[in-house]
Image (cartoon, rainbow, N blue to C red):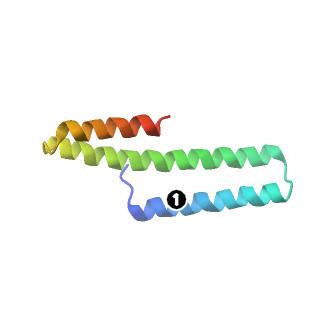
Amino acid sequence: MKCSKKNIITRLRRIEGQVKGIQRMIENDEDCTEVLVQIAAVRAAINKVGGVVLENYSKNCILKVAENKDAEDEMNKLIDTIVRFTK
């Protein structure tokens, strides 16, 4: 799923709005169950954005490897990035 920079920014702004909504919920002493549901939604949304960014980055690295531009270095960077993202 190739996602443009504009689409990623739009997703991040939506997440920002969700986080602000959670903050208001806490300030208004809303039900913890509802707060937790919203936190789970934000977590899922940020994981999705991270996945899209990782996918775009991975494709770019693989293209560099296919063009034989510092293939080993690019693969090591990709592996390191995937490991850090999945922690």
Residue sitting at the far left: 68
**Residue at horizontal 66 percent and vertical 57 percent from the top:** 19
Residue 16 against residue 70 in the figure, above or below: below
User: Where does the image place residue 14, in percent across and percent down from the top left?
Assistant: 58, 61
How many discs appear?
1
User: Where does the image place residue 78, in percent across and percent down from the top left?
Assistant: 32, 39
Residue 78 against residue 8 in the figure, above or below: above
Splitting the image into 4 quarters, where does residue 37 fall? top right
Quickly name the residue at label 1: 11
Badge 1 marks a residue whose secondary structure is helix
Splitting the image into 4 quarters, where does residue 65 fall? top left
Three-letter amino acid code at disc 1?
Answer: Arg
**Residue at horizontal 62 percent and vertical 50 percent from the top:** 42
**Residue at horizontal 19 percent and vertical 46 percent from the top:** 64
Splitting the image into 4 quarters, where does residue 54 fall? top left
Residue sitting at the far front: 73
Left or right: residue 72 compared with residue 46: left
Left or right: residue 48 compared with residue 69: right
**Residue at horizontal 72 percent and vertical 60 percent from the top:** 21
User: Where does the image place residue 71, in percent across and percent down from the top left?
Assistant: 18, 39
